[in-house]
Amino acid sequence: MNDPRRRGPQRPDSHTKWGSQDVSADSLIAPYGGALASLIVDGARRAVLQRESRDWPSVDLSPRQLCDLELLLSGAFSPLDGFMVRSDHDRVCTEMRLGTGVLWPLPVTLDVPEALAVKLQPGQPLALRDPEGVMLAALQVEDVWKPDLRREAELTLGTTHERHPGVLRLLRETGAFYVGGRLEGIQLPVHYDFRLLRHSPAELRAEFNKRGWRRIVAFQTRNPIHRPHHVFSGRAASELQANLLIHPVVGVTKPGDVDYFTRVRSYQAVMHRYPRHSAMLSLLPLAMRMAGPREALLHAIVRRNHGCTHFLVGRDHAGPGADRGGKPFYEPYAAQELISRHQEELGIEMVGVHELGYVPETGEYAALDEVPAGCSVRRVSGSEVRRRLVEGRPIPDWMSFPEVVKELKRTYRPRHLQGFTVLFTGLSGAGKSTLANVLLVRLLEMGGRPVTLLDGDIVRKNLSSELTFSREHRDINIRRIGFVAAEITKNGGIAICAPIAPYAAVRDTVRQMISEVGGFVLVHVSTPLEVCEVRDRKGMYAKARSGIIKEFTGVSDPYEVPTDAELVIDTSELSPDQGVQQVLLYLEKERYVMGAMDNGG
């Protein structure tokens, strides 16, 4: 079997279509590994695979898996010809090397649930499908194994702290088994948006040739382009006498990032600010791991496969920020240092970007270590721009461009016009439902937005009647509540939720889900257990203590006390009106509602 992961790049078999731009066909930088391979098969082979696949096991891919598959099939992940087998995975984790010894920084794996994994054997084909059931590729199974995901996180991400989104994905969202093997592609995932801005590596190389570009510096971004980004990208291209590829990620990025539709419109709006014919925009369907230095290496490889000769690397490239204690997961400029050590082997030149600040005295941006003596400096961050947008505050011209701000304002409405969710969590009998009902009435009284109550008992009756009270089913129930609340929030409404929600991990999942589309407020109703038992009109606690009811929160099943609640309310000390007034005052302070102090209480 031709397998570039093990023996280096080989010529394809008779069924495989290779990218139209190989090394001999253009004078651009050679693809990583020596040859750029599209894994899409020809028409005859495609027909055979589609016919035979009717009897194969299949898996519907997640958005993240679809991104990885697209980059594998298009050749952006050359020299990989499929999802990694165990030997490649293990060596990549420990040494950043494939089995062939080729430098490769991060695993590219296909995770599946145990129910599917136990049915798979080496040599067996597996159909890979999109969420609508369309077959995209056939995977020839070579390996099926259960990975140590915590060890993978420690080796590749440098931490097992679940504040890191990559760790959270691995430990909470990844299937229990990996399946590795060679791919035969039927078709790339279909995109109906921004079609003229989507290019495979071969297509982008052909476009560079058509334009006569030979030195191309790639700018990776998952954020809008504000003034400092424009300055350092433009300066880099000018100093290198190179053309500029704006190559933003439009796959899965960091939770809380601006949605890519908004970002792409903002990129389009700012392109005219670069010198004419010097820059172009192309979209990259990459699923980010937020793996910092290691991910920077992967990004460099992908850009080399697209024909770029230089790559801009920032201060905290692909970093997820800081942990709850405020400590960054990766040291400043660690990505630049790692790429510098491997730059010759990577075959693409790194251009290090240092943090810029605006100097009011000169009216220009300067590297922080080059600010003239006696001058002040102002820093710009995407989070500061977003904060000003949601608070309805003006954004100075020195921070961003008017056309970019205009696009962002279409998405980031002031908080008092946004949707939000209030999630009450606590023991049975703590007073969650009472607080939720009072809050519902008070918000309806204030008016302005639709308000929906998702109480635990209501949801159990209408959305989750088939579920038991096992931990797995409780998590499913809370995720369903989170999904409905996120849809309400996304569309400008207010969702009030009052489940027990005893487990921290699923509460974190719901917070992440809703925070991506609007506001989220967690209220811990901390009423003591003994008070909850006294209030119990249905005798549930007594039945739990006698063993009649199994897995009852607070008695035979744990309640994980929130450490990240925005508010803590003890209803043994406060009346419902007083408790709800605390919630309203918090919402007013955070600008979600206006004039809470003047309503009731």
Image: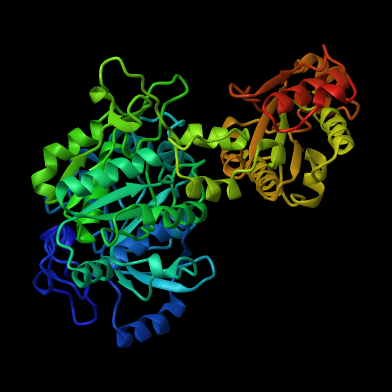
Residue reaching furthest to the top: 573
Splitting the image into 4 quarters, where does residue 302 fall?
Answer: bottom left
Identify the coloring: rainbow
Q: How many marks?
A: 0
In the foreground, 348 or 114: 348
Q: Quadrant of the N terminus?
A: bottom left
* Residue 141 in view: no
Say left or right for 465 vs 372: right
**Can the viewer see residue 215?**
yes
| Quadrant position of residue 242 | bottom left
Q: Classify 260 as above or below 587.
A: below
Which of these two is toward me, 472 or 398? 398
Residue 295 as seen in the image, left or right of residue 171? left
* Residue positioned 14% across, 38% down in the render: 340
Direction from residue 235 to residue 443 in the image, left or right: right
Above or below, comparing residue 362 to residue 4 in the picture: above
Q: Residue furthest bottom?
A: 44
Residue 414 percent across, percent down from the top left: 65, 38
125 sits left or right of 558 in the view: left
The one of 73 and 216 positioned closer to us in this rendering: 216
Q: Position of residue 588 (x, y in %)?
A: 73, 26
Residue at image position (59%, 24%) is 564
Residue 186 lies, in percent from the top left, at: 36, 76
In x, y percent, where is residue 74?
A: 30, 67
- Picture quarter containing residue 200? bottom left
Q: Quadrant of the C terminus?
A: top right
